[in-house]
Amino acid sequence: MGTNENKPKPTCKLIGRDGNVYNLIGTAKECLRHAGQRDQAEAMAVRCFHADDYDHVLAIIGEYVNII
């Protein structure tokens, strides 16, 4: 899946933030929305909420945004 190939992945500051998985998903969604990628924000969130564990959520987020 991943992001829309026609749009670059936005950069999202997640390192050093509250590591709560729901906070990270919300922050990544906000980065995508600010980049005009609302559909990708929703798709990412759905995938994250169906992920098996924390590491899988981080991997999914990394498909949609550049994590810094």
Image (tube, rainbow, N blue to C red):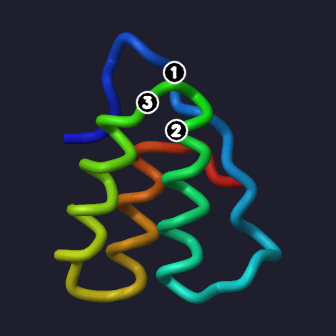
The quarter of the displayed image where residue 6 is located: top left
Foreground label between 1 and 3 = 3
Residue at image coords 70%, 64%: 14
Decide if residue 60 is on the left or right side of residue 7. left
Say which residue label 2 marks.
Answer: 33
Determine which of the numbered discs, if any, sits on residue 37 in the image.
3
The local crowd at label 2, few if under 14, some if 14 to 19, many if 20 or more residues have their Cα within 10 Å, is: some
Q: For the N terminus, give its image quadrant.
A: top left
Amino acid type, callout 3: Gln
Decide if residue 21 is on the left or right side of residue 56. right
Q: Are marks 2 and 3 in contact (CB under 8 Å)?
A: yes
Rounded to the nearest whole Å, what is the CA distance between mark 2 and mark 3?
Answer: 5 Å
Query: Which x, y percent locates residue 62?
Result: 47, 53
Residue at image coords 34%, 33%: 3
- The kind of secondary structure element at disc 2 is helix
Decide if residue 50 is on the left or right side of residue 22. left
Amino acid type, callout 2: Arg
Placement of 51 over or under 38, stated as above or below: below
Say which residue label 1 marks.
Answer: 8
